[in-house]
Image (spheres, helix red, strand yellow):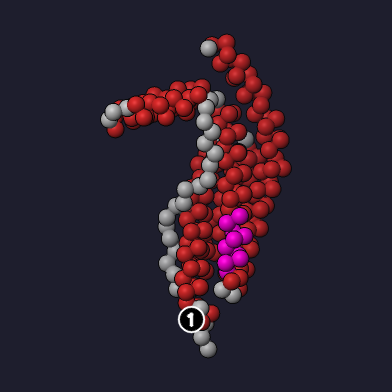
Amino acid sequence: MDTQEQQNPMGNIKLLQYLNEMLSVENAAKERLQFRIEETSMSYTKQQLQKHLEETKAQQQRLKNIIGNRGGNPTSAKADLPIINPKTETTARVDEMVESATTTEEKKESIKSIVDETENVMMKPEKELMEVKQDAIIENAEIVAYKMLIDVAAKVNAEDAIIVLKQNLQEEESMFNWIMTNTPRMLDQLWRYIESSAGTRTLNA
């Protein structure tokens, strides 16, 4: 008796493509989580990120297993994760300097000078708050991606994939809920430093 992959080869090819796209997201998410664990100053956040890192490693392996079992080759590529990139006076100056620079080297120096200035202005608590926002955006994007991938798997009757994808989805939803539940606590902890640093910058302006 033919397998589902043999019965619907084109559907399986597309499913493998989307599974590898999801794997590339988890590959990038793993790398980012490792960075976040090193950088965060909040112990309870570090603990939760460590927990989710282990979940992400398991998610990667599950995806690799599905892809391999269905005749595909798991990717090692890393996706570009969704982030917010707000435009401020400083970032607008970066754009202007890059556009006005006449050589590649000048562009590099222009960007470096503004980035260095921005790093000096943005205090560590502000960076942490920005990263928390990014955490929530990335987790929500993963939730959307997994739900769509589950729908695709259902279209080609890939029950083996659906079971695993739902497990990954549940872990992403749990992480997203943790972030949203703990955001007020994190903001309370960070805000007094952000507020005081803003006062210092005003005085020194």
Closer to the camera in the image, 52 or 2: 2
Residue visible at 62% across and 68% down in the picture: 163
Residue visible at 53% across and 42% down in the picture: 83
Q: Is residue 169 toward the left or the right of residue 10 in the image? A: right
Q: How many marks?
A: 1
Magenta stretch: includes residue 148? yes
Residue 76, above or below 106: below
**Residue 120: x %, y % from top left:** 48, 22
Write the start and end of the magenta stretch as one range.
144-153
Residue visible at 60% across and 39% down in the picture: 133
Residue 136, above or below 78: above
Mark 1: amino acid: Gln
Q: Badge 1: how crowded within 10 Å, few (<14), some, or many (20+)?
A: few
Tell me, yes or no, if residue 53 can be seen here: yes
Magenta stretch: includes residue 158? no
Residue 140, above or below 13: above
**Residue 141: x %, y % from top left:** 58, 50
**Residue 182: x %, y % from top left:** 70, 40
Q: Which residue is mark 1?
A: 6
Q: Is residue 152 toward the left or the right of residue 184 in the image? A: left
Residue visible at 56% across and 59% down in the picture: 59
Tell me, yes or no, if residue 55 can be seen here: no
Name the main secondary structure of what is drawn in magenta. helix
**Residue 26: x %, y % from top left:** 52, 54
SS of the residue under disc 1: helix
